[in-house]
Image (cartoon, rainbow, N blue to C red):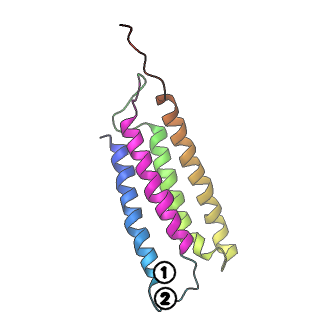
Amino acid sequence: MPKISRYFIKSGMLFLLFGICIYAIAEFPGFNGDLPLLPVYWHMIALGWITQIIMGVSLWMFPKGKNSLSKHGSTLAWVSFYSLNLGLLFRLVSEPFVSVHRELALVPFLCSIVLQILGVFCFILEIWPRLTPVPRKSV
């Protein structure tokens, strides 16, 4: 398994663990619900866990083709990994405060959106050339 796939899958598992913890805290009896944690939970589960597991497995399973330079992952794949995870971290620290302290949370919130889009875009650029048909051998 390539190193980049291991990183995507392991970080996805961490987002699952912390997402469940955030959900448990938000649903705990007596929790002061001034901060909306449900959107944070959904981002951790949808982008942090499910999307990263899919990305890691697809980078591992789709053929690399003739232009493969590294068994550890290409630059595009690493940019995708770091952008997506940094964007998710910005999202986690800014989203609960967007409605309360908009002026403080707006810049990290917007950065999170840009970084997450960049991460997904780099992943698409990385995986697209791998989606070629396998030539059939004539009998």
- Image quadrant for the N terminus? top left
Which residue, as the protein is rendered here, is positioned at the far top? 139
Mark 2: amino acid = Phe
Q: Give residue 61's mark.
A: none
> Please, what secondary structure does the residue beneath circle 2 have?
loop
Cβ atoms under marks 2 and 1 closer than 8 Å: yes
Compared to residue 17, the image places residue 25 above or below, namely below
Q: Is residue 29 left or right of residue 124?
A: left
Across and down, in percent, residue 34 comes to 58, 85
Across and down, in percent, residue 105 comes to 63, 71
| Residue matched to label 2 | 31
Q: How many marks?
A: 2
- Most foreground residue, 29 or 109: 29
Residue occupying the point 37% across, 37% down: 61
Q: Give residue 26's mark.
A: 1
Which residue, as the protein is rendered here, is positioned at the far bottom? 30
Q: Residue 111 is drawn in which quadrant?
A: bottom right
Which residue, as the protein is rendered here, is positioned at the far left? 1
Q: Residues within 10 Å of mark 2 (few under 14, many from 20)?
A: few
Tell which circle, 2 or 1, labels the residue nearer the N-terminal end: 1
Residue occupying the point 45% across, 44% down: 78
Q: CA distance from mark 2 to mark 1?
A: 6 Å
Across and down, in percent, residue 107 comes to 65, 65
Residue occupying the point 45% across, 75% down: 22
Across and down, in percent, residue 11 comes to 38, 57
Q: Residues within 10 Å of mark 1 (few under 14, many from 20)?
A: some
Compared to residue 94, the image places residue 46 above or below, namely above
Mark 1: amino acid = Ala
**Residue stretch rendered in magenta on the structure:** 38-65
